[in-house]
């Protein structure tokens, strides 16, 4: 039997916190992630839906979390029943008894009884926190609400009001607890080692796929659960495609290689991008563009601290990268005018930061209804400036064509400023060249 990965007190504390934010007389319903089956014969690796796991620690598919603060039972799980035949094929199941014993559910029922029992559990609820985005589960849940309404009869109440819980748990997940920070530091450390292994391995003639194999092996032997997202291994001009996904082309002498890859540990993600020369030595042109982007990234990292408005980070990136492009002749004009007209977007089209946590693009508002979002201790975000110049762009200086450079690190906001969780991954030119030489 596979034991739960973490102490159940962690998940109990989260349920207690969200209970204080929920309306009186309300319930939250979260379905598990669908089973990862592509066809009848092939099963793909399963990962639990982040919010479901956040409140339960339960990793099986075909499960539903129903939470009713102040009612009895309060914490309810609907799970797959024990089945010796199915377990022989697909592995151990906890069943309702195991869900109560190991995951401390107040009550657990077989998933097949959800329609009947959940209607009873929701009949006295005034508000339901539920997100309408699950094409498979939505019709099932609405049929339960129809049953609740029918049982009330003509003199009863109509449907309970429904609230999307994404901001409720998004704001909770945005501010990391000490336990979550430790998980993210572990994920970052594993990812750092993967990027260093890739740098040691890369040389002219290897394939992007070979590099991906080195990364994957390093992550898994470093006790990562899985990749936090599909890795990007982009050689040469492929790096000018922001979401390059083929990862199957040769790495040629004289080109740069961009790797955007992160490991996941304990359901927490890391996200690092490094760009370096395939032959281990930056050319003069590569070094000029790379150093300009690196200087911008380092200035932004110094800029980030509690109280800063999130949108100010992007403004700093745009200003810094536009200056780099003007200094190198990639753009022409005056910095304020180029920014005003959006000219920089031709070579820098994305945001410089996003929240990081259980998902690589994590939940949490970037702008609050009452105004700007200001950084607070406990938030984790990326800083990832980049410049991308396609090889067929005749308007750019020839020496920079075909270069895509991005440098990305993960920052934890602290009371003093920020802590770079991924600082162990080399990014100074001399560091990279020395590591690759060895």
Image (cartoon, helix red, strand yellow):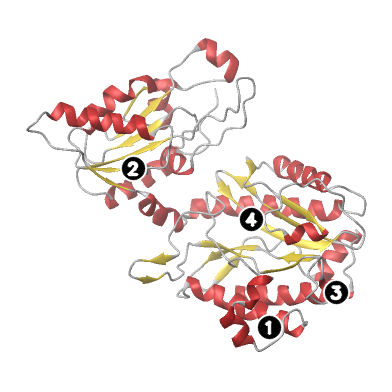
C-alpha span from label 2 to label 4: 29 Å
Compared with residue 284, is residue 107 higher up or lower down, i.e. above or below?
above
Q: Residues within 10 Å of mark 2 (few under 14, many from 20)?
A: some
Residue 141 visible: yes
Label 2 belongs to which residue? Answer: 130
- Above or below residue 159? Residue 301 is below
- Which of discs 2 and 3 lies nearer the camera? The answer is 3
Of badges 4 and 3, nearer the viewer stands 3
SS assignment at label 4: loop
Q: Which mark is residue 398?
A: 3
Residue 405 percent coordinates (x, y): 75, 66
Labels 2 and 4: the sequence-earlier one: 2
| Residue 69 drawn at (x, y percent) | 25, 41
Q: Extreme top residue here?
A: 85
Q: Position of residue 72 (x, y in %)?
A: 22, 32
Which is closer to the viewer, label 3 or label 1?
Answer: 3
Counting residues from the start of the chain, the first of labels 4 and 3 encountered is: 4
Q: Earlier in the sequence, mark 2 or mark 3?
A: 2
Marks 4 and 3, Cα distance to the nearest angstrom?
A: 31 Å
Numbered label attached to residue 323: 1
Which of the marked residues, 1 or 2, is nearer the chain's N terminus? Answer: 2
Camera-side residue of 230 and 154: 154
Q: Quadrant of residue 302?
A: bottom right
Q: Which mark is residue 271?
A: 4
Nearest to the observer: residue 128 or residue 416:
128
Q: Earlier in the sequence, mark 4 or mark 1?
A: 4
Which one is closest to the eye, mark 2 or mark 4? 2
């Amino acid at each position: 039997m596979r034991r739960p990965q973490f102490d159940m007190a962690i998940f109990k504390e989260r349920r207690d916190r969200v209970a204080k934010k929920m309306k009186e007389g309300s319930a939250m319903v979260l379905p598990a992630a669908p089973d990862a089956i592509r066809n009848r014969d092939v099963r793909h690796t399963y990962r639990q839906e982040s919010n479901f796991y956040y409140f339960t620690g339960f990793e099986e598919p075909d499960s539903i979390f129903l939470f009713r603060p102040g009612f009895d039972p309060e914490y309810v799980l609907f799970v797959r029943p024990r089945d010796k035949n199915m377990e022989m094929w697909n592995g151990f199941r906890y069943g309702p008894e195991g869900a109560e014993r190991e995951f401390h559910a107040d009550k657990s029922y077989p998933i097949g009884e959800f329609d009947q029992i959940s209607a009873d559990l929701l009949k006295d609820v005034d508000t339901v926190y539920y997100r309408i985005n699950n094409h498979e589960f939505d019709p099932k849940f609405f049929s339960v609400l129809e049953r609740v309404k029918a049982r009330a009869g003509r003199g009863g109440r109509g449907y309970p009001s429904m609230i999307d819980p994404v901001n409720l748990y998004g704001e909770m997940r945005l501010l990391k607890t000490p336990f979550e920070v430790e998980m993210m530091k572990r994920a970052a450390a594993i990812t750092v080692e993967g990027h260093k292994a890739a740098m040691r391995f890369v040389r002219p003639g290897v394939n992007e796929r070979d590099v991906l194999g080195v990364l994957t092996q390093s992550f898994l032997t470093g006790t990562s659960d899985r990749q936090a997202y599909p890795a990007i291994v982009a050689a040469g001009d492929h790096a000018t495609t922001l979401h390059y996904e083929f990862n199957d082309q040769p790495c040629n002498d004289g080109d740069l290689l961009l790797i955007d890859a992160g490991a996941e540990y304990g359901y927490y993600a890391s996200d690092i991008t490094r760009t370096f020369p395939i032959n281990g030595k930056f050319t003069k042109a590569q070094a000029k563009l790379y150093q300009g982007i690196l200087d911008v990234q380092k200035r932004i990292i110094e800029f980030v601290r509690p109280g800063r408005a999130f949108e100010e980070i992007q403004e700093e990136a745009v200003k810094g990268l536009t200056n780099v492009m003007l200094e190198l002749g990639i753009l022409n004009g005056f910095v304020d005018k180029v920014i005003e007209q959006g000219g920089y977007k031709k070579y820098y089209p994305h945001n410089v930061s996003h929240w990081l946590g259980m998902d690589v693009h994590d939940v949490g508002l970037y702008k609050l209804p009452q105004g700007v979002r200001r950084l607070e201790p406990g938030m984790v975000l990326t800083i990832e400036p980049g410049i991308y110049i396609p090889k067929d762009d005749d308007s750019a200086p020839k020496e920079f064509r075909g270069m895509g450079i991005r440098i990305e690190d993960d920052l934890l906001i602290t009371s003093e400023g920020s802590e770079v969780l991924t600082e162990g991954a080399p990014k100074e030119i001399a560091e990279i060249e020395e590591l690759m030489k060895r």
